[in-house]
Image (cartoon, helix red, strand yellow):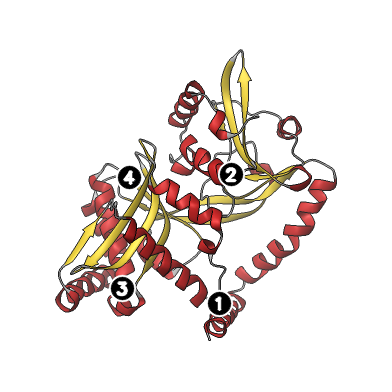
Amino acid sequence: MLPPRELGEGERERWRALRSASTGPRSPFMEPEFTEAVGRVRPGARVAVVYEDGEAAGFLPYERGALGVGRAIGLGVSDSQGAVLRPGLVPDTRRLLRACGLSGYAFDNLAADQDLFVPYAAEEHTTYVIDVEKGYEAYENVLRAQSPKFLKTTLAKERRLGRQAGETRFVFDERDPAALRTLMEWKSAQYRRTGRRDRFAQEWISLLVARLAETRAPECTGTLSVLYAGQRPVAAHFGLRSSTVLACWFPAYDPAWAKFSPGLVLHLRMAEAAAAHGVGLLDLGRGAAEYKDSLKTGELPVYEGAATRPGPGAALHWLRREPARRAQGFVRARPRLASLAARTLRGAGRLRRA
């Protein structure tokens, strides 16, 4: 067990080799670069290295909390979690936790191929994806078949935006730090407007995003995409990109141009650019949203829960998390309650701004 920055280059290469052997989507959240970036802003970050016949055969990135309670690296912002193991290797889960000095390992976006932890899942969720493996034109054909009006309407709004605000221009990998600051300001305002906790008010998340914006690795590249109208940005997104997956992370737009649906236009242009760069999958992340229903071509399962060992640490985790998780699940499963909860959050956001 060691801090991520202490991994040797040989161990990082072995980690990448194991990831390349995985049959699941190669999410950049599962790469060593993401774990190292989290380690720079979260002092409790660790990596357990599992050896087999003198060779590294697996890696478990995690964060250690009070009473040895462990959690997935970057829990709360990472969209794909779990261990990186050689094919066929499934260590005894509780023995691994004991070796790490952990009473438990909590996760909220566990990848579906995680045989080590899936048996401990309490809930299954859906993450929404856009498949552009066959190219952007093929994706447009899927959209036309799914919802004939959606693509036509969105493209018409893009043209109207260009006429009223200035010619539209899309940059897939923008390097201007001012554009990233603008995106974060929009996203913070959106969180407050909808009554949700502002993630960027947490210093470690802001520092993590800034660090990842400078990360350039073949399987983990910070990617800021911006839609401009004239000289002004009207929508932007920051996410992580591997050679095959674009993890859609923080999208936002300028509310002043909301009637033109700049967020939807942005996602179409991201899909087009991703396909041109050889990326075959855009992961829109967990959680239902109208824009995801409009854009998606498929769904994948992710899991939430905790693997635990008997002891006070596991009991503490249960008391802290389980009642709230069950209440949230109860509401999500009932559309009328979920709608009421969303309206209540928006009302709280308006009161907070007032």
Residue 16 seen anywhere in this rendered image of the structure: yes
Callout 3 amino acid: Ser
Residue where numbered disc 1 is placed: 342
User: Which element is circle 4 on?
Assistant: loop
Residue named by callout 4 = 280
Report how far apart the C-alphas of labels 2 and 4 lie in the structure.
25 Å
Q: In this view, does 157 lie to the left or right of 87?
A: left
Give the amino acid type for the residue marked by disc 4 in the picture. Gly
From this view, report whether residue 49 is shown above or below residue 326.
Answer: above
Which numbered disc, 2 or 4, marks the residue that appears first in the sequence? 2
Looking at the image, do the residues carrying marks 1 and 3 touch, with CB atoms under 8 Å apart? no
Q: How far is the residue under mark 1 from the one under mark 4? A: 33 Å
Give the CA separation, mark 4 to mark 3: 24 Å
Residues at circles 1 and 2 in contact by the CB criterion of under 8 Å: no
Q: Tell me the CA gap for discs 1 and 3.
A: 21 Å
Q: Residue 261 carries which label?
A: 3
Q: Who comes first in sequence, dot 4 or dot 3?
A: 3
Percent coordinates x, y for residue 92 in the rendering: 71, 30
Identify the residue at horizontal 65%, vertical 67% (top origin).
328
**Circle 1 residues within 10 Å: few <14, some 14–19, many ≥20:** some
